[in-house]
Image: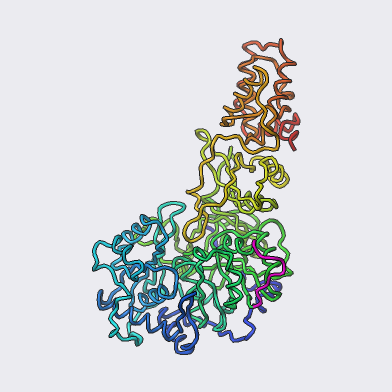
Amino acid sequence: MSELSASPSKLPPEQEAIRAKCFHPTGTFVEFPKEEVEQSIPVRFEKIVARCSDRVAVKDKSQQLTYELLNKTANRMARSLLAQRGKGEEPIAVLFEQGPLGIAAVLGVLKAGKMVVPLDPCYPRASIRYTIEDSQAALIVTNSQNFSLASDLAKNAARILNVDDIDSNFSTEDLETAISPDALAYILYTSGSTGQPKGLVQKHRNVLHQIRNNTNTLHICADDRLTLFTSVTGQAINTMLVALLNGASVCSFNIKEEGPTYLPAWLRQQEITVYSSVATVYRSFVAGLLAGSQFPSLRIIYLGGEPVYKADIELYKNFSPPGCVYISRFGISEAGSVSYYFINKKTIIAGDSVPVGYAAEDMQLLLLDDDGQELGGNRTGQIAVKSRFLSPGYWRRPEATRAAFLNDPRGGDDRVYLTGDLGRMLPDGCLIHCGRKDFRVKVRGYGVEPAEIERALLGIDTVKEAVVVGQDFIPGEQRLVAYLVAKRDTAPTISTVRRALAQKLPSYKIPSAFIMVEALPRTPNGKIDRQALPTADTSRPNLDAPYVAPRTPLEAKLVSIWAEVLSLDQVGIHDDFFDLGGHSLAVMRVASRVIEQGQVKIPLQALFRSPTVAEMAKVITECQGRRLGETELERVLTELESLSEEEAQRLLAEVGGMEQVRD
């Protein structure tokens, strides 16, 4: 790795100006001091309880707890846990539905000096069981509602603590457990949508550093009211702690039960000031709003977990109060939010990508090539984060930890985390996120970032949601497959979508197959589940041209060749070759088969200019009687079959080929 560049020392003036106005109207913000990172989460929480005892800490539609009551509930849970397990650092699983009791349980485990392993009852049972076994959780803390599930997951009843049965004689006073900032606070498991889940561990110090950065960047204060849409797992723990370590209120809305329809009214009723969710949830509820809908208390929209697009910024500008700030960020579980970009109603986003901003305090952003060397500006590389506040690594995965976390080549306490995300750095240090490295697809020799294609698809006014993946097509070759959710009842034709993409992308970035779905599959935490996407089948796509069957033996033969090359079960004689998923190399394959089977001397220029079976049949008919000798036939076939993608595209361009005719 080359010498590492420093993070920008301050924000550009226009960014600083927006950030300076990002305050609650009461102006009661209290800065999170740097020295308070060197303590435990319970110590910081108990200081807040002393200041905000009567304030509402957490609430949902059926229950609310003040800071005093939440603290007492957590203390009783902690004492019961210690009575059953004794002192000492160990993993403790927490299994609760969304709501205040689960939040109290997380705090109780932390107060007991244990590590939280959060479990969501909505996850598949096999996934929950894997998390329990891999984490080696010593106990499952749950309630009567989930006791049956916990009993099935636990090896015996002794490994379960039912908080509904805790002896009321346990004291509710604060514990005097000494917890080091270096102690492990929790083990978070991924959803497993991109492979076997790994448990990420975090220290109290690192968690507090994350909370400090979010607190001081967003100016979170005791008068804020934050959204929580899931049980306390993953990013939800960070949302919970950002509120509770500042005296703010966590307002829980069960979107799986209530649905997005009632969300706008709930946001107004609860006077939510900080909205935080995955981008999909935000789009779902805003899409149903009427013009002029407003949320007067809202001061921050803060999305994470999924890419954000320019269309999301337009939604923000249309449906948020004048002083509301939209914050785009790049966040990872291994380090928290590592960059921020502030957007107001006057912000203009240049290009198709929404920046994820400038490095957070005590974080450095690097872009590395495949050899680990730092890249210059405006080049795409893997995003790496350098800091002393990174996660220690993966639970019981030393090899995975060594592969992802590197020591600072210049020595010191800093380490470098390889995120697996791709990015591009603007000259002023602003980061553009370009998708996941492991989502990158090699298509006919070209490296393709699906996120770029997804952004282009979402720029089409009839497309509501889109995801692009690579799928095996023939041995040694992948193709791009796009999954689309339409904005309206009538889905756009593939011809329309392809023409729109052709205005923005080179031909090799246009997917070979488009699949319309009612909804994209999602993991329980709301992210797109790419493993659950259906495999593209061999059906003829929905084109502008209606299906017309072959009329002659020659057309029937050509239909057979096209269907074989394109792996389709049906081809109409007026179907556009590229609308069917064809590309430059596939043109050569068709030409090779036509010449080989017909042994007809056909000018390649004429053959390449035939975008439909009907037109290709006409060209061949005109050339009947002109036969190729064996030597010439062999030469032509060898030349066609040895062409690379670049050579094929160049040849088509030179002769004004099918792609140019189509456009």
Per the rendered image, the range of residues in magenta is 287-296
**Residue 230 locus on image (x, y percent):** 48, 67
Quadrant the C terminus occupies = top right
Quarter holding residue 3: bottom right
Magenta highlight on residue 582: no
Q: Is residue 571 left or right of residue 526?
A: right
Image position of 59 with respect to 561: above or below: below
Q: From the viewer's side, name the closer residue of 428 and 557.
A: 557
Quarter holding residue 189: bottom left
**Residue 89 locus on image (x, y percent):** 31, 72
Magenta highlight on residue 295: yes
Q: Is residue 4 left or right of residue 83?
A: right
Residue at 72% from the left image edge and 16% from the top image edge:
621
**Residue 448 locus on image (x, y percent):** 59, 46
Residue at 61% from the left image edge and 39% from the top image edge:
512
Residue at 39% from the left image edge and 73% from the top image edge:
106
Q: From the viewer's side, name the closer residue of 604 and 612.
A: 612
Q: Is residue 350 visible?
A: yes
Quarter holding residue 557: top right
Q: Is residue 6 visible?
A: no
